[in-house]
Image (spheres, rainbow, N blue to C red):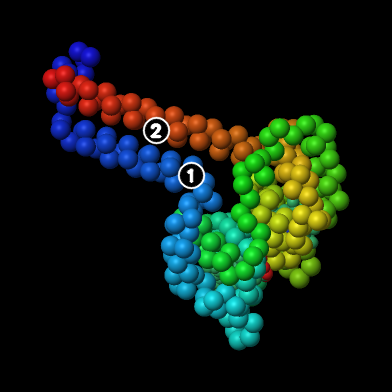
Amino acid sequence: MRFLSAKRRHPAVKVLMLLFALVVIGGVYSLVSPTEQVSADTGKSQQIAEGKALFAVGCASCHGLNGEGQVSGTIQGPPLIGVGAAAVDFQVATGRMPMAQPGQQAPRKPNVYSDEEIAALAAYVASLGPGPDIPKPEEYSGEGLSEEDIARGGELFRTNCSACHNFAGSGGALPNGKHAPTLVGVENRHLYEAMETGPQQMPAFPDRALSPKEKRQIIAYLNELHEQPNQGGLTLGSLGPVSEGFWAWVAGLGVLIIFTVWITAKGARAK
Ligand code: HEC
Ligand code: HEC
């Protein structure tokens, strides 16, 4: 402890460290905490009210004030009654909604809402009519699936998806200037939600078309496909491991900082 108390530190250092720790912890929390758990039943109606308010500002101009849709006039949007929380989570988290310009295919773009706001929007739209819920992590994780499952996922992918997304999942053009995007680097949750809700030109694959297990098999197949090292050249498919490493880094740093603050506090008392 000597090295800690021997040196006089500027009093602002402690405050700064505390602030930094709070920011990091807050950031980690907002990233790690699963949005679908936000709603303890008491918070639910408040969340829906929040979502309704956000919806009125950001979405109602195209989808109608009550999500009833707007199918005539220059600004249009389909009704959202019954599309479910999963569709909202997919559309908003991948930045497709709010759509910037009416007319063309809504592209993936940086998302403008926080996780909490997306959860609120999703809860509001879900309250309009029953629809698919946001999937839980165990529904879209490929963990625990065997090689056989993955091979089956490959078969299912080639049968159901490759016509549009290409057999390597790297995307492809569709008629009328539309395109099916690449699936490299798409989060598992969004893979699941896209299958469940069928965005735009894509058909939906409800559970009777692809069972939850089959969806997981496809996801596991894509994970494996895109983690395989390229045969030379730049590796573009390694987003998974990179982001996982990033997690470990952020969480690890958070713990270190808490520890630092704790030591500082102890050091100060020892003085
Ligand atoms: C500029 C108009 C516009 C705005 C603003 C807009 N949308 Fe949309 N939205 C559309 C159109 C058009 C589609 C249909 C896209 C298609 O299928 O080609 C759509 C589709 C959707 C879908 C998919 C529906 C389905 O059947 O799966 C959801 C969910 C959605 N919007 C949610 C939202 C939310 C939430 C907001 C606000 C954050 C929002 N939208 C803002 C125009 C808009
Ligand atoms: C008829 C063509 C078609 C088929 C078949 C199809 N998709 Fe799609 N898919 C699309 C189009 C078009 C989009 C883009 C929709 C949009 O931008 O909203 C898309 C989007 C996606 C996305 C979102 C990607 C992103 O960047 O956010 C995922 C994930 C996806 N598809 C997975 C699948 C899987 C898995 C299957 C097979 C079970 C499949 N698709 C079958 C046409 C198709």
Q: Please, what is the three-letter code of the amino acid marked with disc 2? A: Gly
Nearest the viewer among 67 and 239 is 67
In the rendered image, which residue does mark 2 sit on?
Answer: 254
The location of residue 187, given as percent across then percent down, is 62, 47
Q: Is residue 202 left or right of residue 18?
A: right
Q: In the rendered image, which quarter is residue 129 located in?
A: bottom right
The residue furthest bottom is: 73
Q: In the image, what residue occupies the spot 44% across and 46% down?
A: 30
Q: Is residue 49 above or below residue 144?
A: below
Q: In the image, what residue occupies the spot 44% across and 70% down?
A: 53
Q: Please, what is the three-letter code of the amino acid marked with disc 1? A: Ser
Dot placed on the residue nearer the N-terminal end, 2 or 1: 1
Q: Is residue 206 above or below residue 265?
A: below
Q: Is residue 185 left or right of residue 30?
A: right
The location of residue 249, given as percent across then percent down, is 47, 32
In the rendered image, which residue does mark 1 sit on?
Answer: 33
Q: Is mark 2 within 8 Å of ligand 2?
A: no
Of the two numbered discs 2 and 1 in the rendering, the one whose residue sits closer to the viewer: 1
Image quarter in which the N terminus is found? top left
